[in-house]
């Protein structure tokens, strides 16, 4: 049975960077490496990575910021574009967390029936969100 996953931004970075893959939880690593898994990375994550790289917060991820599509292909992952419905749900989530990137990822995972791979505990407070780590 195919399982569908949305990689949180940090998960995408760690899975894509050989020296950081050890940071992934065992279940997360198994899901990412499973050839039957469908992996998705949100356009919101690409915006977050590019923005943080530009501002000097992620200098070690230059290759990902500059070659995002090649990085996606290397993980055998697919781009998850943003749409109006996802943006609306993200803005209206009954969740106190204010980070717009996290809100978008939560909404996308809910609406697209994806399991979010993340170690970020803030997602524990999102209703109806499946999380794996």
Image: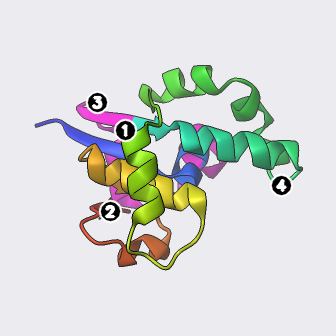
- Mark 3 and mark 2: Cα distance apart in space: 19 Å
Across and down, in percent, residue 49 comes to: 69, 44
Please state which of residues 8 and 27 is positioned toward the viewer in this rendering.
8
Q: Is 53 situated left or right of 85 in this image?
A: right
- Mark 3 and mark 4: Cα distance apart in space: 32 Å
> What element does badge 4 sit on?
loop
Magenta stretch: give its range: 14-39
Q: Residues within 10 Å of mark 3 (few under 14, many from 20)?
A: few
Can residue 40 be seen by looking at this rendering? yes
- Labels 1 and 2 touching (C-beta < 8 A): no
Residue 98 belongs to magenta span: no
Q: Earlier in the sequence, mark 3 or mark 2?
A: 3
- Labels 3 and 1 touching (C-beta < 8 A): yes
Residue behind mark 3: 35
Residue behind mark 4: 57
Across and down, in percent, residue 128 comes to: 24, 66
Depth check, mark 4 against mark 1: the one in front is 4
Please state which of residues 128 and 49 is positioned toward the viewer in this rendering.
128
């Amino acid at each position: 049975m195919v399982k569908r996953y949305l990689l949180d931004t940090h998960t995408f970075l760690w899975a894509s960077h050989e020296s950081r893959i050890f940071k992934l939880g065992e279940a997360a690593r198994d899901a990412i490496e499973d050839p039957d898994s469908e992996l998705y990375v949100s356009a919101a994550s690409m915006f977050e990575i590019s923005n943080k790289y530009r501002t000097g917060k992620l200098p070690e991820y230059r290759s990902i910021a500059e070659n995002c599509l090649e990085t996606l292909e290397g993980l055998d992952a697919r781009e998850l574009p943003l749409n109006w419905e996802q943006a609306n749900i993200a803005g209206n989530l009954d969740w106190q967390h204010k980070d717009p990137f996290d809100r978008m990822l939560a909404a996308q995972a809910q609406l697209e029936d994806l399991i979010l791979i993340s170690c970020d505990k803030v997602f524990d407070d999102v209703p109806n969100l499946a999380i794996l780590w």
